Amino acid sequence: MGNIYEVGDIVKMKKKHPCGENKMLVLRSGMDFKLRCVGCNREFMIPRSKAEKNVRTVIKEAES
């Protein structure tokens, strides 16, 4: 299956962040995902299972 999400991707989540934005920048992907909210720049980590369940689409792919 491989790694679907890469560092630098912007993903659209199903649920909004408390600031009202639902787009997140992927800073780290592995067993945990480190995400940064595009709206308020707050960084947080969530488990991979929760991240994959809550991502709706990849908006912008990381440039290789």
Image: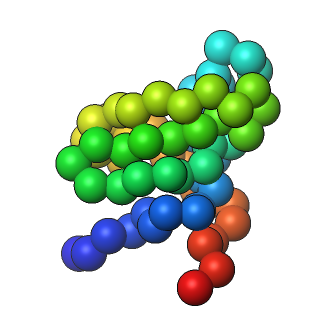
Q: Is residue 20 left or right of residue 44?
A: right
Residue found 47% across the figure and 29% down from its top:
44
Residue found 51% across the figure and 41% down from its top:
35
**Who is closer to the viewer here, 37 or 56?**
37
Up-down relation of residue 41 to residue 18 (above or below)? below
Q: Quadrant of the C terminus?
A: bottom right
Up-down relation of residue 56 to residue 20 (above or below)? below
Residue found 37% across the figure and 44% down from its top:
33
Up-down relation of residue 44 to residue 23 (above or below)? above
| Residue 47 locus on image (x, y percent) | 28, 36
Q: Quadrant of the N terminus?
A: bottom left
Residue found 58% across the figure and 62% down from its top:
9
| Residue 2 locus on image (x, y percent) | 26, 75
Q: Is residue 53 left or right of residue 44?
A: left
| Residue 13 locus on image (x, y percent) | 57, 39
Is residue 53 visible in the rendered image? The answer is: no
Up-down relation of residue 2 to residue 10 (above or below)? below
Query: What's the colour scheme?
Result: rainbow
Number of marks in the rendered image? 0
Instruction: State which quadrant residue 42 falls in.
Output: top right
Q: Is residue 44 left or right of residue 36?
A: left
| Residue 30 locus on image (x, y percent) | 27, 55
Q: Residue furthest top?
A: 18
Instruction: State which quadrant residue 48 falls in.
Output: top left
Is residue 5 visible in the rendered image? The answer is: yes
